[in-house]
Image: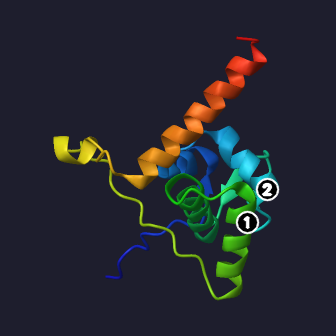
Amino acid sequence: MSPEPQEKKSYKIGEVCRMAEVQPYVLRYWETEFPPLAPNKSGGGQRLYSQREVDVVLRIKQLLYSEGFTIAGAKKKLDAELRSGGVEAAPVAVQQTPSVSESVPSPNDDRLRKTLERVRGELTDLLKLLGR
């Protein structure tokens, strides 16, 4: 008896969103910015992502959210990785409830600092737009 393949041939946008923990509009935007991300569409227009495209999505998320790259920087990095033979995205972890020590970031966490600085800048820009 042969084992069933565990890897699906294609994934719908909702499945990819759950795996990457991003909203569908984010994936649609990334498709416009990252040419390697070009899912096929079903007869009904549903986006169908291959496993390679799922890997690219996960790598894009890692570059943007975890490593702090800009869109332009992430494009360059992703292109270089694809030219050199492949994309290595962080494996998708099974959702588990984090322990207290895992859920509280260290005050010295560089990623946290960068994220907070980015949020602060965006809030400052919003206040300027509102004239406050």
Mark 2 → mark 1, Cα distance in angstroms: 8 Å
Residue 108 vs residue 32, the one in the foreground: 108
Mark 2 and mark 1 lie on one chain; the one further toward the N terminus is: 2
Q: Which mark is residue 102?
A: none
Measuring from the top left, give residue 120's x and y in whole percent.
57, 32
Measuring from the top left, give residue 21's x and y in whole percent.
50, 45
Answer with left or right where residue 123 lies relative to residue 8. right
Q: Are marks 2 and 1 in contact (CB under 8 Å)?
A: yes
Residue pointed to by mark 2: 33
**Residue 97, quarter of the rendered image:** top left
Colouring rule applied to residues:
rainbow
Residue pointed to by mark 1: 75
Q: Residues within 10 Å of mark 1 (few under 14, many from 20)?
A: some
Q: Can residue 21 be seen by looking at this rendering?
A: no
Query: Is residue 69 depicted above or below 27 in this figure?
Result: below
Answer with left or right where residue 45 lies relative to residue 89. right
Q: Can residue 60 be seen by looking at this rendering?
A: yes
Measuring from the top left, give residue 77's x and y in whole percent.
67, 72
Q: Residues within 10 Å of mark 2 (few under 14, many from 20)?
A: some
Query: Is residue 26 depicted above or below 90 in this figure?
Result: above
For the C terminus, the image quarter is top right
Callout 2, which amino acid?
Answer: Glu
Which callout, 2 or 1, points to the residue nearer the camera? 1
Q: Secondary structure at mark 2?
A: helix
